[in-house]
Amino acid sequence: MYHKKGNVYPEKKEGEIPEISSSFFFVKTNIKVQCNCMEDCIVTVKVIPKSSKNSAQLENGILRVHLNAPPVDGKANKALIQLLASIVHIPKSSIEIVRGEKGRNKQIKIKGLSESVFTQRLAEYNNT
């Protein structure tokens, strides 16, 4: 039995819907509900560190990113995240390196951004 402010509710049996007249009801359950309302975008990136300027271009489905930062102590990764955040106008905390943290070829996950919006914002960045 469940209790809420003096009200007594019957145990919920499997496959049975309890009859309750109160607005408060608690049910023990092991079901976890996940709502993925926002899309995630995973981008394959090739990083070219120690370049003369920061830039990003989409070539053959791979995003080529030129960075000023050297590939030492994660400076290039930080610069990559900062550049991508400024290109797609989202916070840096929404960008995560999924694979390739120590190499030039990486997979980047951008939370809350669809692939079509990403390509649109990248095109706007390259046109300016």
Image (cartoon, rainbow, N blue to C red):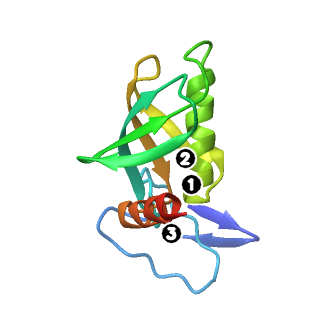
Q: Residues within 10 Å of mark 2 (few under 14, many from 20)?
A: many
Q: Give percent across and percent down for residue 83.
A: 59, 43
* Three-letter residue code for mark 2: Leu
Return the residue nearer the eye: 49 or 105.
49
The Cα atoms of the two marked residues, 3 and 1, are separated by 56 Å
SS for callout 1: helix
Return the residue nearer the eye: 100 or 63.
63
- The residue shown at (64%, 45%) is 92
N-terminal of the pair, mark 3 or mark 1, is 3
Q: Residues within 10 Å of mark 1 (few under 14, many from 20)?
A: some
* Three-letter residue code for mark 3: Pro
> Is residue 52 positioned above or below 95 on the image?
above
Residue mark closest to the camera, 3 vs 1 = 1
Q: Tell me the residue that label 1 is attached to.
A: 87
SS for callout 3: loop
Q: Quadrant of residue 65?
A: top left
Q: Tell me the residue that label 2 is attached to.
A: 84
- For the C terminus, which image quadrant? bottom right
Q: Which mark is residue 10?
A: 3
Return the residue nearer the eye: 89 or 35.
89
Using residue 4 as the reference point, say whether residue 116 is left or right of it: left
- The residue shown at (63%, 22%) is 75
Labels 2 & 1 near each other (Cβ < 8 A): yes
Q: Residues within 10 Å of mark 3 (few under 14, many from 20)?
A: few
